[in-house]
Image: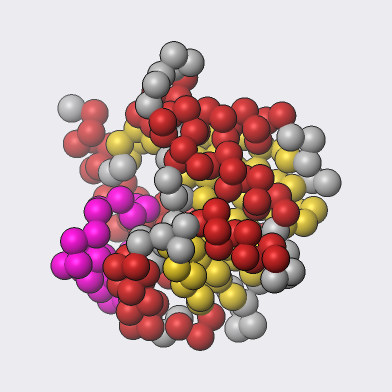
Amino acid sequence: MAQPQWTAVDDYFTDHLVGEDEALRAALDASEKAGLPPINVAPNQGKLLQLIAQMHGARRILEIGTLGGYSTIWLARALPEDGHVVTLEADSLHADVARGNLAHAGLAGRTEVRLGPALDTLAALAAEGAEPFDLVFIDADKPNNPRYLEWVLKLTRRGSVIIGDNVARGGAVADSDSTDPSVRGIRAFVELAGSNPRLSATAVQTVGTKGHDGFLLARVIA
């Protein structure tokens, strides 16, 4: 009975604290119609991302893993008028759907969807001398999370905030013997964040419509 209860609680919080407007619902509908996997963040999680970005005063945001742009909408709405989100997506269909959803939400002018494997687009951003990002949301293929973090540390500065999604893996993250590439990637990501002297980090496990999950939150301190 745990999952129905978790979902009911999330629904209650969303109804009273979050809400979803037409653009957010349309983004989910367009993603479903295009056959994208239903792995977007939950509405209350999207609102949490938005609040963190607003409290931090983020002006430049980097997202690794766009999917249909649902989380991108939440993040972009946290920005000031001169703010910008760069979001990285490896799948061309996903990128096309996201661009359409962002345009429908009136956010095309402050968002950029870059197509290609994130390790390549991250390297390109570094080569371009991109201005440091104030907030980074990592929500892509988990085996590459440690390498994503290494690149992100080159694209941020002291005070930047890093959020890594889906770190509990239904509790499997605690299994040191797991052979699952996603679990191993997350464990390496967590351990890298914990051992890097440039980061102060924690992780929180959650339950809700997404099941037993969690996120890692880190701040660049040096």
Q: Is residue 43 above or below residue 141?
A: below
For the point 51% across and 56% down, the residue is 118
Q: Where residue 34 appears, x then y in whole percent? A: 20, 67
Residue 131 in view of the camera: yes
Q: Say above or below: 137 vs 5.
A: below
Residue 16 visible in the current orientation: no
At x 47%, y 27%, the residue is 184
Residue at the location (31% across, 46% down)?
A: 10
Q: Nearer the viewer, residue 133 or 5?
A: 133
- Quarter of the rendering containing residue 189: top right
User: Which residue is at a point 42% across and 45% down the rendered structure image?
Assistant: 141
Q: How is the image coloured?
A: secondary structure
Is 38 situated left or right of 153 in this image?
A: left
Asked if 221 appears above or below 59 in the picture, the reply is above
Task: For the N terminus, give its image quadrant.
Answer: top left
Q: Is residue 49 left or right of residue 218?
A: left
Residue 73: x, y in percent?
43, 70
Residue 208, located in which quarter of the rendered image? Answer: top left
Please state the horizontal and vertical placement of residue 9, each as a whole percent of the image.
Answer: 29, 42
Out of 145 and 5, give the one closest to the viewer.
145
The residue lying furthest to the right in this view is: 222
Residue 17 belongs to magenta span: yes
Which segment is the magenta one? 16-42
- Number of numbered discs present? 0
> In x, y percent, where is residue 193?
65, 35
Can residue 78 be found in the magenta stretch? no
Q: Residue furthest top?
A: 177
Q: Nearest the camera: 139 or 49?
A: 139
